[in-house]
Image (cartoon, rainbow, N blue to C red):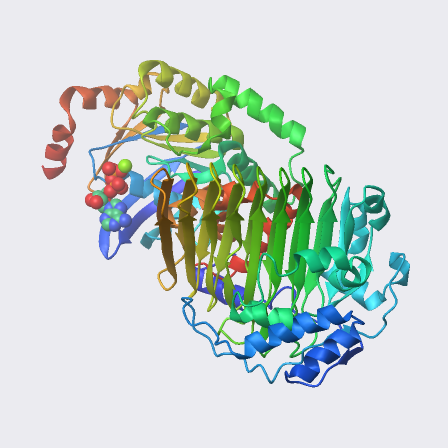
Amino acid sequence: MAYTEEELKKELETKEYEYGFYTDIESDTFPKGLSEDIVIAISQKKQEPEWMTEWRLEAFRIWKEMEEPEWANVKYEKPNFQEISYYSAPNKKPKYNSLDEVDPELLDTFKRLGISLDEQKKLAGVAVDIVMDSVSVATTFKKTLAEKGIIFCSISEAIKEHPELVKKYIGTVVPRKDNFYAALNSAVFSDGSFCYIPKGVRCPMELSTYFRINQAGTGQFERTLVIADEGSYVSYLEGCTAPSRDENQLHAAVVELIALDDAEIKYSTVQNWFPGDKDGNGGVFNFVTKRGICETNAKISWTQVETGSAVTWKYPSCVLKGDNSIGEFYSIAVTNNFQQADTGTKMIHLGKNTKSTIISKGISAGQSQNSYRGLVQVNSRAENARNFSQCDSLLMGNKCGAHTFPYIEAKNKSAQIEHEATTSKIGEDQIFYCNQRGIDTEKAIALIVNGFSKEVLNKLPMEFAVEAQKLLEISLEGSVG
Amino acid sequence: MLEIKNLHASVEDKEILKGINLQVNPGEVHAIMGPNGSGKSTLASVIAGKEEFEVKKGSIALEGEDLEELAPEERAHKGIFLSFQYPVEIPGVSVTNFMRTAINESRKARGLEDMPANQMLKLIREKSEMLEIDRKFLSRSLNEGFSGGEKKRNEIFQMAMMEPKLAILDETDSGLDIDALRIVANGVNKLRGKENAIIVITHYQRLLEYIVPDFVHVLHDGKIVKSGTKELALELEDKGYDWIKQETVV
Ligand SMILES: Nc1ncnc2c1ncn2[C@@H]1O[C@H](COP(=O)(O)OP(=O)(O)O)[C@@H](O)[C@H]1O
Ligand SMILES: [Mg+2]
C-alpha cells in the first residue's frame, strides 16, 4: 500500500516512546525538599565518614548562594528544587553475586530495553555496573578486574573502601563552586560509579554503566570519578534510557576524569532519556558537568551520542594541563519535536604542544533547537597549541533550528586554531534516490543520518555503535516531511 | 512489460507530459530521444513514481499491474530501476553499504532473508569486474566527489547488482569517454534478456551504436511525435531535432 507523507507522519507520531515504561520496585524515598538536614540524612543513610558529610554540607552552602544559570540557548520552566525528593533507593538492598538473585522485574526491564544482563554478560569483556535509582544493584566481572588491581564500584562503596583515593580526587576537576548544578550535585549526589586503573595497567575490557531514572519526581544526582594512573588505559561506557513520564525530571550529574602522566581515558556515552512527547510535554532535564584533566602526555576522548532529554545542557571538557596532552570531543546530538539541546565542549590548553580535536554533528528535526557551543582557550604559557574543530548540522524540515557558537580565546601567538562549519538539509532528491533503489523513506533517513554521523559513530566501541545507530533511528521516527 | 496509456503529468500546474503512449515488451530495448526540455527525464521520474509530479490523466502498468497506487520503493521492489541523469550525493554512505541496504530491502519486500555476506561479496566482485570498477571506489561515499563518468558507471554498477526487470537509463552516456561508454554499454547488454526490457534515454545516437535499440521514439514537447526503428536515430543525427519540430508544426 502506498503511503503519503502525511499518513506516514501520523502513523509514526502515534508510536509511543519505545522505552516508555517503568519498573515498579519498592523503594524508600525521602520527603521532598532540600535543607542541611536532608544533606546530612543522605550522608548518614549511606553510612559515609564525617569528612564526606562535611564536604557535602560545604557544597550545599555554596549552592544556596548561587543562581541558576540563564545563558544557555534553551527555554524551560525552572525546576522547583523544594519539590524534588533527593534520595531513593531500591528496598531490596543486598548485592547480588549472580544474575539469578536479581529482582526478576528489573531483569525484565533490561530485557525490554534490549540490553539484558544475559546478553551483556555474553558480550565479550563488558563489566556492567547498573545504577538504578541511585544505588548499584549489581556489579559483575569484578573479580577479573580485581586481579589487575582495577577498582570499579559504586562511588558509595569507594567512599567506604577507598577513602584515600576519593578524598584526594573528588572535586579536583569539577570544584563544588564550579557551577550551580555541580554544587547541587556535590551536596546531594546519591550514587554513581568509581573507577581506578593502577599504574601501567591496560583495562582488559570496556567498563560500562547503565543509568536509569526510575522513581517519579526523584532527581538524579550521579557522581562519577574515573582515575587513570600513570601510563594506564581505560575505555568507559555510559548509557541510559528512561521511562516516559508526564512531569519533568531533573538530572544533574557530575563526571570527573583524571588522566595522570601518559594515561588515556576514552569515555563514551549513549544517552536516550525521555525527550517529552510530540507536543513537548514531559521529558528529562539534563544538566551535566563533565570534565577531564590531562597531565603530561595524557589523552582524554569524549564520545557522545545524545538523543534524549527535553532540555540538554552539557559540555564535556578537557583541561590540557600537561605538556603534549591531547583532548578529543566527538559528538552526535539529535533533537526532534520540541527538544532543546545546548551542548558542546571546552578545550582548555594550558600545557605546551597540547592538541585538541572537536567533531560535532547536530541533527535537528521537528521543531527542535540544536545548539553547539564550543570554547577553545589557549593559555599564554601554552606554546604550539593546536585545535581543529568541525561542526556539521543536518536539518530535517523547515521548523527546526541549528546554531553554532564557537568561542576562541587564544593568548599565545603560536596557537593554530582551525574551525569548519557546514549546514545541510536532507533533500527530497536524496530520499527519492534511495526510494528508487527500494529503500523506504524511514530507512533512507536512517541511512543518510548514519552517513552524516559516521565519523563519530566510528569512534564508539563496536557494540555501542550498533546500539547508537538504533537510537538514532528511533529518535528520528516521525520526522519525515 | 510496460504499458503507458495517454499519460499526462504536471508539476506545479505546468503540464509537462501531454499524452504519452508507449508499449515495451519483454526482451525489447527502446530508445527515447528528443531535444532538451522535451520531458524525457520527467517521463523517467513519473514511471519511477516521483511524487513531485502529478499524474493528471492516463495510466502506467507494469506486467499488467497499475502503478498509480505504488510508492517509489514499491515500484523498485517490482523491478523498476532508474539510472539517474544527475545522481545525488549521500555523504558518509559507501557504495557498498548503499547497495547492501538496497538489495536487502528489496529482498525483505519479497519475503526473503538478507543476502548472506559471502554471496553479497561475490556479487559485488563479479559486477565490479564486469564494469571494470576499482573496488576501492566502492568504499567511497556515494557519488561524493565522483566525476561525471564515475557517477554514470556507478549507476550501471547498481543496475547490474539489482538485476531489474525494467531499466531506464537517463542520459547514461553523457560524461563518459569512449572507452567508458564501451564498458558501460557492454554491462547493459549483459542485462538484456528475454525477461528484461530497457529504455535508453539519450541525446545522441552514439550510445545506440553500442546498445542497439529495437525501437526509437522521439519526444517533443511532452509527446512522442515519431517512432521507428534504429534507423530513425541516424536520420535524427543527420537532420537534427529542428526537422522533427518542423514536422510536428506541419
Ligand atoms: N520540478 C520541476 N519543476 C518545474 N519544472 C520542471 C520540473 N522538472 C522539469 N521541469 C520542466 O519540465 C520540462 C521537461 O524537463 P525534463 O523532463 O528534465 O526534460 P529533458 O529530460 O527532456 O531534458 C522542462 O521545461 C523543465 O524545465
Ligand atoms: Mg533529462
Q: Position of residue A237 (x, y in %)?
A: 66, 50
- Quarter of the view holding residue B213: top left
Q: Position of residue A115 (x, y in %)?
A: 73, 55
Residue A115 showing in the rendered view? no
| Position above or below: A400 against B86 | below
Point 45% across, 58% down: residue: A480
The quadrant in which the C terminus of chain B is found is top left
Point 88% across, 67% down: residue: A94
Q: Position of residue B92 (x, y in %)?
A: 47, 39
| Position above or below: A120 against A74 | above
Who is closer to the viewer here, A32 or B176? A32
Q: Is residue A422 left or right of residue A299?
A: left
Point 56% across, 44% down: residue: A457
Q: Is residue A46 left or right of residue A385?
A: right
Q: Position of residue B140 (x, y in %)?
A: 47, 30
Residue A32 showing in the rendered view? yes
Tally of numbered discs: 0
- Quarter of the view holding residue A230: top right
Extreme top residue here?
A: B179
Who is closer to the viewer here, B195 or A199? A199
| Position above or below: B152 against A381 | above
- Quadrant location, ligand no. 2: top left
